[in-house]
């Protein structure tokens, strides 16, 4: 059985532009994508810290080093310039992979630079044993 778990997140990025008339997606500075291990066209869940809205979309690559976080299409109406967002990517893992996989969190500066990268702990063998009892 596969379990869907957090792969990586970009935490508290600042929305720099909203374009409701553009094709859907979220455009992200490749510096942040590289730090998180996220890729173009990957599905992501975006949570707006200012208003609580959540939406799914997919990644477009922005201009490297620009700090760009641009929300496009209908989702642009769910956030705003200057809002802080959390961008989450998920993956499906086997129990064996889950035991050692460590999700990554990229903490952003106010200009969407990389302030810190955190590797979350793996579920570990104990975590897998606990899951099998549920």
Image (cartoon, rainbow, N blue to C red):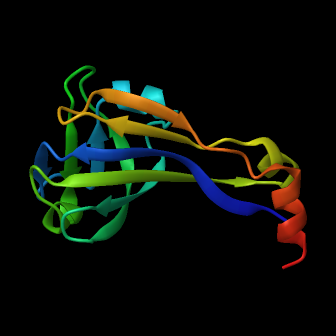
Give the percent coordinates (x, y) of residue 35: 45, 28
Q: Is residue 23 visible?
A: no
Q: How many numbered marks are there? A: 0
Q: Where, by quadrant of the figure, is residue 33 drawn?
A: top left
Check the image and name the residue furthest to the bottom.
134
Image quarter in which the C terminus is found: bottom right
* Residue occupying image coordinates x 90% and y 63%: 129
Q: Where, by quadrant of the figure, is residue 4 drawn?
A: bottom right
Relative to the observer, which residue lies in front, 127 or 61?
127
Q: Is residue 54 visible?
A: yes
* Residue occupying image coordinates x 88% and y 52%: 125
* Residue occupying image coordinates x 29% and y 30%: 29
Give the percent coordinates (x, y) of residue 66: 19, 24
Image quarter in which the N terminus is found: bottom right
Is residue 47 depicted above or below 134 in this figure?
above
* Residue occupying image coordinates x 38% and y 51%: 87
Relative horizontal placement of residue 93, taking residue 57 as reference (left or right): right
Give the percent coordinates (x, y) of residue 58: 39, 51
Give the percent coordinates (x, y) of residue 43: 47, 53
Relative horizontal placement of residue 121, taking residue 111 as reference (left or right): right
């Amino acid at each position: 059985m596969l379990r869907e778990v957090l792969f990586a997140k970009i935490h508290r990025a600042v929305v720099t532009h909203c374009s409701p008339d553009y094709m859907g997606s979220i455009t992200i500075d490749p510096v942040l994508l590289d730090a998180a291990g996220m890729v173009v066209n990957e599905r992501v869940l975006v949570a707006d810290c200012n208003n609580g809205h959540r939406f799914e979309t997919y990644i477009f690559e922005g201009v490297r080093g620009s700090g760009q976080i641009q929300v496009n299409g209908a989702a642009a109406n769910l956030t705003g310039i200057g809002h802080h967002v959390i961008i989450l990517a998920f993956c499906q893992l086997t129990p064996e992979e889950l035991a050692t996989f460590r999700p990554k969190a990229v903490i952003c500066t106010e200009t969407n630079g990389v302030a810190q990268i955190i590797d979350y702990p793996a579920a570990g063998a104990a975590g897998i044993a606990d899951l099998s009892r549920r």
